[in-house]
Image: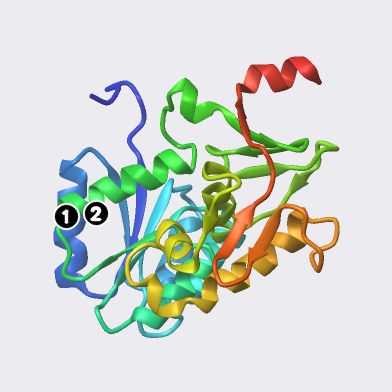
Amino acid sequence: MSDPSAAPVHILLVDDEQSLREPLAEYLVGQGFRISEAESAAGARSVLLNAKPDIALVDIMMPGEDGLSLTRHLIEARDLPVILLTAKGEATDRIIGLEIGADDYVTKPFEPRELVARIRSVLRRAGRASATPEEDALYAFEGWHLDPLKNKLTDPDGSVIAISTAEYRLLKAFLDHPRSVMDRDRLLDMVQGREAHLFDRAVDNQVSRLRRKIEADSRSPEFIQTVRGGGYRFAADVSRVAQHEIKAGT
């Protein structure tokens, strides 16, 4: 049960379809969330002038500025977790949304209870909810550290390396399965979820981007190695280290 003294999670709901937006907002309020509604990207930007929501639900197809453009702004300028609200025929846009950093998606029509579960899951990953000590532990490899709550990667010198949500998910998938050969289908399922197998080049693009962030020479990778005919393998030992242990050692 949530702490009644805690401020409710603030959701920015952006959808031009009033018949969906208003009942969904009412349902989410009934689940204990605070809701700000907008019927367009312009309306969402106006809301953001005076509010700092914890998460955004964004419809992809809207008149004027579309949901993908708004999503990019929310992620890059606001560091805001985003769940896309998509139609069945928007598979390509859905994958683009995930590649630019959206955290998840639901396909219309959706079960509101599923959406609430996804909201809470994304908030946990984004560090906007309480975590267990195990969830709080950092991933450590060869002097690098990945904070699974803040999605923050630091190099052996302690410098923060900027990574997108998609790059974070991919790196975490590797760190959860070190030295294991992981084919593209498995990686895509772990990183992008449902229907991602239709876009197997997406994982190659993300691997290339991630290599440029963590490899001394991305053309001769030390960590993320290509396995011919098999996919990829993270070729380093990985451990979990408590936050206080890192601070004590600095």
Residue sitting at x 61%, y 61%: 76
Residue 187 position in % (x across, y down):
48, 61
**169 vs 124, nearest the viewer:** 169
- Disc 1 on helix, strand or loop? helix
**Is 211 positioned to the left or the right of 124 in the image?**
right
Residue sitting at x 81%, y 36%: 158
Residue located farthest toward the top when viewing the structure as drawn: 248
Q: Is residue 30 above or below residue 169?
A: above
Q: What residue type is labelled 2?
A: Leu
Residue sitting at x 68%, y 17%: 245
Q: In this view, does 164 lie above or below 33?
A: below
Residue 121 position in % (x across, y down):
35, 44
Residue located farthest toward the front when viewing the structure as drawn: 229
Indicate which disc residue 115 carries: 2
Q: Name the residue under label 1.
A: 112
Q: Which amino acid does label 1 sit on?
A: Pro
Q: Dots 2 and 1: beta carbons under 8 Å? A: yes
**165 vs 60, nearest the viewer:** 165
Report crowding for label 2: few under 14, some 14 to 19, many 20 or more residues within 10 A (C-alpha): many
Residue 203 position in % (x across, y down):
54, 69
